[in-house]
């Protein structure tokens, strides 16, 4: 079994007076935080506070780049062209990077959110545009995304470090794609089922993936009501199974 994995969570998704998630409860158990940058979720104060939490717990800071869709939480498909994909990505990287810099930290990775995640997985021009913005901003940033995707291909072609991501709390179809959220079985509700899937992803990779690419990071969605309990249970189970949980590029303690 691969003995090292990153544990990431989508965070900083509150907006104004509206609260989402338990970032303070989740942060102690993860190694990478994907922080919303104000397009699909988040606002200035939420970004600042979430970055501060990540710094406090020595968690790697990532930009969770989404579509400009606060009302739909970035999960609605929108038509954008490559020029917009580049600009949206650069805008969000710059915003979160400013908060990280003031907090004495820097960005570690970038991950697309929601509908954009699936769009850049399948659309080569959009993937190339997003990767171009990341490269132009900081070519040292890692790119988190689906293992078999246009995003993976574009990242490798641009010389960026691509980090293959699996989901601990979402089910997969036999072709290796995530079941759509409209499917009643799409979400994994029990911690035992999530642990079992996580270990399979670490050991064997995605179902239906002939490349055999192993997962380097596992994602937990921070908008689930039991995210803190889930994060603690999953982290403890992985470590009990002999898996070292640490962010890519960081030394193993």
Image (cartoon, helix red, strand yellow):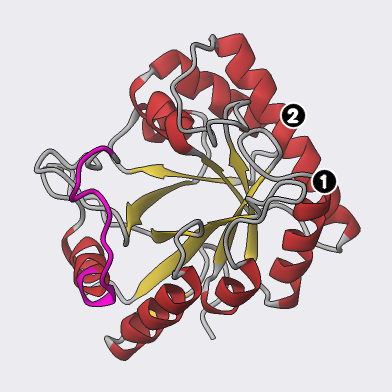
- At a point 52% along the width and 78% down the height, the residue shown is 29
Along the line of sight, which residue is nearer the eye, 87 or 249?
Answer: 87
Image quadrant occupied by the N terminus: bottom left
Q: Position of residue 247 (x, y in %)?
A: 52, 67
Classify residue 221 as left or right of residue 43. Answer: left
Q: Can see residue 233?
A: yes
- At a point 20% along the width and 41% down the height, the residue shown is 183
In the image, residue 167 above or below residue 55: above
Along the line of sight, which residue is nearer the eye, 229 or 133?
Answer: 229
Check disc 1 and report the residue beneath it: 44
Q: Which residues are magenta?
A: 182-193
Check disc 2 and report the residue beneath it: 91
Q: Position of residue 94 (x, y in %)?
A: 78, 37
Residue neighbourhood size for the residue with mark 1, other residues' Cα within 10 Å, grouped as few (<14), some (14–19), many (≥20): some
Q: Secondary structure at mark 2?
A: helix
Tell me the mark number nearer the camera, choosing from 1 and 2.
Answer: 1
Q: Can see residue 136?
A: no
Residue neighbourhood size for the residue with mark 2, other residues' Cα within 10 Å, grouped as few (<14), some (14–19), many (≥20): some
Q: Position of residue 103 (x, y in %)?
A: 86, 62
Q: What separation in Å lies between label 1 and label 2 (alpha carbons)?
A: 13 Å
Q: Secondary structure at mark 1?
A: helix
- At a point 69% along the width and 68% down the height, the residue shown is 54
Image quadrant occupied by the C terminus: bottom right
User: Is 214 included in the stretch rendered in magenta?
Assistant: no
Q: Earlier in the sequence, mark 1 or mark 2?
A: 1
């Amino acid at each position: 079994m691969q003995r090292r994995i990153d544990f990431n969570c989508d965070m900083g998704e509150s907006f104004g007076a509206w609260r989402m998630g338990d970032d303070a409860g989740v942060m102690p158990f993860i190694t990478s935080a994907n922080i919303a940058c104000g397009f699909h979720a988040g606002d200035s104060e939420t970004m600042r506070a979430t970055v501060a939490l990540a710094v406090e717990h020595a968690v790697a800071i990532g930009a969770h780049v989404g579509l400009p869709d606060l009302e739909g939480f970035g999960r609605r498909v929108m038509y954008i062209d490559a020029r917009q994909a580049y600009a949206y990505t650069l805008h969000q990287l710059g915003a979160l990077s400013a908060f990280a810099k003031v907090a004495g930290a820097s960005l570690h990775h970038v991950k697309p959110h929601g509908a954009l995640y699936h769009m850049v997985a399948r659309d080569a021009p959009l993937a190339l545009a997003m990767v171009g913005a990341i490269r132009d901003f900081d070519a040292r940033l890692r790119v988190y995304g689906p293992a078999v995707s246009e995003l993976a291909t574009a990242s490798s072609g641009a010389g960026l470090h691509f980090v293959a991501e699996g989901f601990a709390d979402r089910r997969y179809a036999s072709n290796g794609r995530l079941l759509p959220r409209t499917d009643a079985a799409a979400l994994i509700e029990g911690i035992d089922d999530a642990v079992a899937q996580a270990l399979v992803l670490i050991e064997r990779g995605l179902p239906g993936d002939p490349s055999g690419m192993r997962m380097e990071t596992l994602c937990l969605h921070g908008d689930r009501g039991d995210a803190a309990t889930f994060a603690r249970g999953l982290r403890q189970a992985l470590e009990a199974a002999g898996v070292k949980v640490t962010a890519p590029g960081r030394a193993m303690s």
